[in-house]
Amino acid sequence: MRRIEITNSAKAILEALSKSDLNKSIQLRLQDISGPVEEKGEMPPHLLEALYNYSLMAQNYSETSSKMAQILSLSPLTKPSEWLVFSTDPNQLFQIRHDLTKYN
């Protein structure tokens, strides 16, 4: 990978994270998790929308951007089959939010 490819890939990933409002949606979900037990397994619309928007943007990543997102452990954010865990497991949300704050 050339330096310009890495720079452009980082910009593309940061832009997708920012435009999707993923960090904000995760923060809102973490606040909601302290709610009643029956609500903990539900996927809030704001989080589902943010994950969906990010995954759509990630589909347009270059090969280098895709590799970089994988290295940064962002791949689960593009896999709907893994989204439910973000709604039910606070530890997963805390980890992703921690990772996102490093990049965003």
Image (spheres, helix red, strand yellow):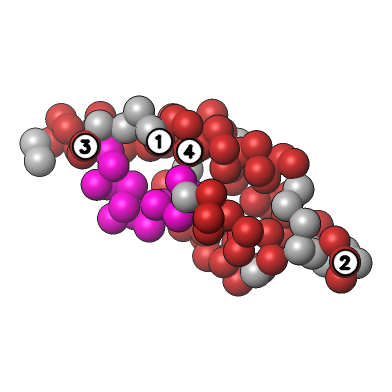
Q: Crowding near pointer 2: few (<14 within 10 Å), some, many (20+)?
A: few
Question: What's under tag 2, amino acid-wise?
Answer: Glu
Image disc number at residue 55: 4
Question: What's under tag 4, amino acid-wise?
Answer: Ser
Viewer can see residue 9: no
- Report the residue marked by disc 1: 58
Task: Calculate the distance from the C-alpha at mark 1 to the C-alpha at mark 4.
Answer: 5 Å
Quick one: SS at disc 2? helix
Main SS of residues in magenta: helix
- Report the residue marked by disc 3: 63
Write down the region rendered in magenta.
Answer: 65-78
Q: In the image, 8: left or right of 11?
A: left
Task: Calculate the distance from the C-alpha at mark 1 to the C-alpha at mark 3.
Answer: 11 Å
State yes or no: discs 3 and 4 in contact (Cβ < 8 Å): no
**The quadrant where residue 76 appears:** bottom left
Question: What's under tag 1, amino acid-wise?
Answer: Ala
- Report the residue marked by disc 2: 38
